[in-house]
Image (cartoon, grey):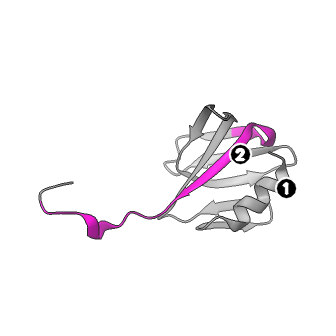
Amino acid sequence: MDRQTLLSILQDAPGVTVDGDAVSADAERGLNLYVGQPGQAMVIRDVADMKLADDYVSASTRDGKATFYVACDEIHALSTVPPKDKSERRAGFA
């Protein structure tokens, strides 16, 4: 997708804050990027921060173990994951 489309989606995504070229995801939410072609994509899970350049994105994972550099036109989707509802837990089950 092009940079402007990606930026528009990120601005509308719940739990995502866009400040100029800097993007951050709330600590309680997960942000996932789908890179490649539909049906043959790699998922970059649990993205904490992103920086948008003119034709690529750098995405850092929440655990700090990796930063991915991806061309904007290779990103075809993103998803946000709502916070886990801990009230659904039952005694004796994790």
Q: Which residue is drawn at 30% across and 67% down?
A: 86
The C terminus: image quadrant: bottom left
Q: Where is residue 70 in the image (x, y as percent from the top left)?
A: 73, 38
Q: Which of 81 and 65 is in front in this view?
A: 81
Looking at the image, which residue is at 55% across and 66% down? 26
Check disc 1 and give the amino acid type: Gln
Is residue 10 within the magenta segment?
no
Query: Which numbered marker is on residue 58?
Result: 2
Give how far across and how far down residue 93 sits, in percent: 17, 55
> Is the N terminus in the top left, top right, bottom left or bottom right quadrant?
top right
Quick check: 44 left or right of 76? left
Q: Of the numbered discs in the image, which one, if any, rests on residue 31?
A: none
Please name whichever residue, 69 or 45, is drawn nearer the observer in this view of the structure: 45
Going 13% across and 63% down the picture, which residue do you hit? 91
Position of residue 93 in the picture relative to residue 59 (left or right): left
Distance from disc 2 to disc 1, alpha carbons, whole Å, reads: 16 Å
Q: In this view, does 34 lie to the left or right of 1?
A: left
Going by the picture, which residue comes out furthest to the top?
A: 40
Label 2 sits on what residue type?
Answer: Ser
Circle 2 packing at 10 Å, graded few (<14), some (14-19), many (20+), is: some
Residue plotted at (44% across, 64% down): 83
The residue that mark 1 highlights is 4
SS type, badge 2:
strand
Kindly state the secondary structure of the residue where label 1 is placed: helix
> Which stretch did the figure color magenta?
69-91
